[in-house]
Amino acid sequence: MEKRILTGDRPTGRLHLGHFVGSLQNRVRLQHEYDTYILIADVQALTDNFEHPEMLRQNVFEVALDYLAVGLDPERVKIVVQSMVPELAELTIYFMNLVTVATLERNPTVKEEIKQRNFKRGVPVGFWSYPISQAADITIFKAHLVPVGEDQLPMIEQAREIVRRFNGLYGKVLIEPRAMLGTVARLPGTDGGAKMSKSLNNCIYLSDPPDTLRKRVMSMFTDPTRIHPTDPGHVEGNPVFTYHDTFNPDKAEVEELKERYRKGTVGDVEVKQKLHAALDAFLAPIRERRAQYESTPARVREIIMEGTRKARAVAQQTMDEVRSAMKLSYFE
Ligand code: TRP
């Protein structure tokens, strides 16, 4: 059997450069080697956006456009809407027996997210237990590899634990998945904060038009200890240079800028202008592909429908095996 990839994103907004280096890049690179399923995780997104279903509905389409824009090949990759694969909900219920409350309470990513969200009426059970449904996402497609950003590692670990428990109890039906991290573990925000995050407004989006890109780059945080362009500056931990290292293919130019920055012979403006040029060149083909697909929404809809249909067939097959392993196939 061809090895499979499963990964996904919550449709809460358009995708940004952090998504690209964390996971999208690996998906594009591996799409011809692996049978690839990409989940637009609207059910997971509902767990903290259940009051705004219309926002998610709009963003399912936006996220699909971002996938196609970065070069995921719709002939090859299955783009899947999570809610349209109800077998996922069924598997989640069975998995719930295999995870303790204490384990969920220890999940560092969920803990951190709960802190950020500051749920007024307490933490919804759906949100708190989403690592279980994410384990179902991964295992129902029998994925071997899960390209994700660093923050998702606890989810993959939880999925692995569930698989071991399930296979131990009911027989070897499921595959224990491996995480694959991106080239950059975590891309800082334009404000120098730990990561790009929509709520912090420190993102560069894959779909940012040229003027927005320019504004975002020219207003980036640099070395806070440097006041004049003639002051020696710090390159390490400086987000402008982190982005140069990640997105500027002209390594000689980057080295030269770093050297001059350390000596105080180049201003922030020049460093940013060169970063802007590099990012603009990087985003140009992505923008162009996005525009093409945006002009054919019916085609995009068809791609999502077709991907979801194929994925559902795989999910149904796995569920037949799961039910039979669990002695739940009564009428056969
Ligand atoms: N939790 C992921 C995120 O917030 C989205 C996601 C849902 C996912 N299901 C998945 C990622 C399965 C990898 C595998 O971005």
Image: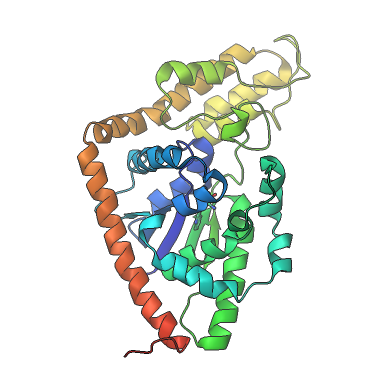
For image coordinates 55% across by 76% down, the residue present is 163
Tell which of 87 and 107 is nearer to you.
87
Where residue 72 sits in the image (x, y, percent)?
Answer: 33, 47
Is 134 situated left or right of 31 in this image?
right
Query: What is the quadrant of the C terminus in the image?
Result: bottom left
The extreme front residue here reads 121
Query: What is the quadrant of the N terminus in the image?
Result: bottom left
For image coordinates 45% across by 70% down, the residue present is 90
Where residue 270 sits in the image (x, y, percent)?
Answer: 57, 13
The extreme right residue here reads 225
Is 154 situated left or right of 88 in this image?
right
Is 296 situated left or right of 17 in this image?
left
Tell which of 257 and 186 is nearer to you.
186
Relative vertical location of residue 65 with respect to residue 95 in this rendering, above or below: above
Tell which of 197 and 235 is nearer to you.
197
Q: Is residue 24 visible?
A: yes
